[in-house]
Image (cartoon, rainbow, N blue to C red):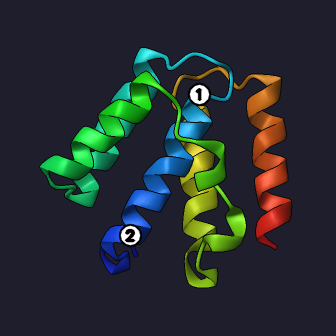
Amino acid sequence: MLEELSREDRMQLMRFVCSFAWADLEVRPEEREFIIKMITHLELDEDETAQVAEWLQVPPPADDLDPEDIPREHRKLFLNAARAMILSDGNVEDVEAENLIILDALLR
């Protein structure tokens, strides 16, 4: 299914994933590793990778994260990616769980 994402959809997915990495105000090494694997799996180009690297330094702007903008056919994928992100470090903070619940509700 990831292969079906357009460039815009891939970057939107990475914005959401990076925002979930920042949910507890800290991007842990395991979360960075997860994001690097996603970059590779999504075959992001050099510019896209550089943008994601910036989001690992400073979270993506909140106004770029509207769940309503996620295409219906990709919503489950985005939710699963966010879930995988918060599980990647083996420690689910309350704020991460709450954000996932909110995203799930908004995507329904």
Q: Nearer the viewer, mark 1 or mark 2?
A: 2
Residue 72 is left or right of residue 4, and the answer is right
In the drawing, what numbered circle is on residue 8? 2
Residue depicted at 15% across the width and 55% down the height = 45
**Callout 2 secondary element:** helix
Percent across and percent down for residue 56 are 41, 28
Image-quadrant location for residue 19: top right
In-front residue for pair 96/70: 70
Figure check: 5 above or below 60: below
Amino acid type for the residue under numbered disc 2: Glu
Amino acid type for the residue under numbered disc 1: Trp
Residue 24 is left or right of residue 17, and the answer is right
In-front residue for pair 30/13: 13
**Callout 1 secondary element:** loop
Residue depicted at 60% across the width and 48% down the height = 82
Percent across and percent down for residue 87 are 60, 34
In the drawing, what numbered circle is on residue 22? 1
Which comes before the other along the chain, label 1 or label 2? 2
Residue depicted at 59% across the width and 23% down the height = 90
Q: Are marks 1 and 2 in contact (CB under 8 Å)?
A: no
